[in-house]
Image: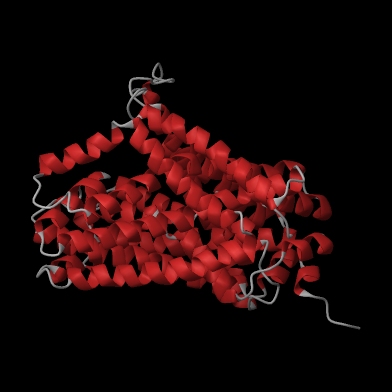
Amino acid sequence: MNNPSPASQRGGDSEASIKRGLWSSRMAFVLAATGSAVGLGNIWKFPYVTGENGGGAFVLVYLFCIAAVGLPIMMAEILIGRRGGASPIRSMGQITRRDGHHRAWGLAAVIGVLAAFLILSFYSMIGGWAVSYISTSATGQLTGLSADAIGEIFSGLLGNPWALLGWHTLFMALVVFVVIRGLRGGLERAVTILMPALFVLLLIVVGYAMTTGHFGEGVAFLFQPDFSGLTTAGVLVALGHAFFTLSLGMAVMMAYGSYLSKNVSIAKTSIVVSVMDTGVALLAGLAIFPIVFANGLEPGAGPGLIFQTLPLAFGQMPWGSLFGTLFFILLTFAAWTSAISLLEPVVEWLEEKKGMSRGKSTIGAGIACWLLGIVSILSLNVWSDVTPLGMFAMFEGKTIFDLLDFVTASVMLPLAGLLVALFAGWIMTREALQNELAMSARSFSLWYGIIRYVTPVAVAVVFIYNLL
């Protein structure tokens, strides 16, 4: 008897699996999954939340949370996608139907796909900011400006809906351009170019940071723990960021897992992706903090660190325009690879559920995200005083953009992640999990214990904390 092909070994319909194709290699999947995980959260958010929460102690807690929460859920999402061999929603449906589980568990994938769609709508707008700053830095507009002048450039961008619309449109077009070309011609080709380029750019900026005279200070800030500056809130921020930075709860890893060959180890691959994602975050800190310290700036400057604090530094330093441009190209690449992964689950669903071609489903989903993104753009300027749920204390002052961010990051993602952890840990059979993971008995028992007891509690704590 002939050995079954990798496609036919998966739990889904073999003909559908063959039509969908597989990643050409394990490395292609690693680059794609890392590209999804490495995004604005690594380059933009990780440095400033580290700065806000005391540095090294926060990093230590964050690394522990990656291992205890992020990695187990990533493995669960990938194995669900590979076992179903279809889009996230269909994969969950096939697994529940075939194994006799309640179909309501499919809600985890539905929430994830919807969250990915909503996030992409405003993520594209923020990606557009990064693209705009490439030209701003390259043309020397930041050179020699004061902090107030730098702030006015950023405020001017946010206050100009037409400029925001143009950059948002360009960024979304870049995303559609890749996704419409499919698995091999689009996703694989893009990540095999963008991810190595991202690492090279990041290392160049780190190399420049080493010449500032404050690199040692940046290293100490990142890696010397001072637990006196770490609060309970900081621990919960580390827990939440560890969960979100790996693109969990968005059905992305389910979608990418559905293209994964049976002979690839989910555990080893997930570990590599987690390490690479964390490495990028730490390198970003090593690139940013020496520059911040060299210019006497505040490491805990908040969200403005990238678009206001760092441009001020680039504007004052030798070769600032060059390295500022390289940095914002790096930021754009990180946002681009993540945005590609956010569109993929929606496109897969349209292809399977609606029977649409790859081209039509990608263009349709892209236009829908683009239109919704206009709402976020207007909420920064023309509709800045519109607070739909302002009558409730917890939503007071929140614009439409703020609400989209809150609902996705604080409600939908942890809820989807919690459902995935419970489904894998308590609903799927131990045999099915062992067949997919193919780990040693000892390693599997460790993962199984964590996904059943540790991970759900940790995610539930983050979920409840976000709602308080």
Give me the residue at 57% from left, 67% from top: 188
Q: Locate residue 321 relative to residue 360 in the image: left or right.
A: left
Q: Locate residue 240 relative to residue 190 in the image: left or right.
A: left
Q: In this figure, what is the number of numbered marks?
A: 0
Residue placed farthest to the top in the image?
391
Above or below 396: residue 149: below
- Of residue 315 and residue 400, the one placed in the foreground of this image is 315
Q: Quadrant location of residue 150?
A: top left
Give me the residue at 36% from left, 37% from top: 164
Residue 107 screen position, x and y as percent = 66, 42
Query: What kind of colouring is applied to the model shown?
Result: secondary structure
Residue placed farthest to the front in the image?
139
Give me the residue at 57% from left, 62% from top: 187
Residue placed farthest to the bottom in the image?
1
Q: Quadrant location of residue 147?
A: top left
Q: Quadrant location of residue 287?
A: bottom left
Give me the residue at 69% from left, 63% from top: 82
Residue 381 screen position, x and y as percent = 32, 27
Q: Locate residue 59 relative to residue 438 in the image: left or right.
A: left
Quadrant in which the C terminus appears: top left
Residue 225 screen position, x and y as percent = 23, 64
Judge whether residue 75 can be spotted in this image: no
Above or below 257: residue 407: above
Residue 245 screen position, x and y as percent = 43, 55
Quadrant in which the N terminus appears: bottom right
- Of residue 98 and residue 213, the one placed in the foreground of this image is 213
Above or below 40: residue 26: below
Judge whether residue 191 can be spotted in this image: yes
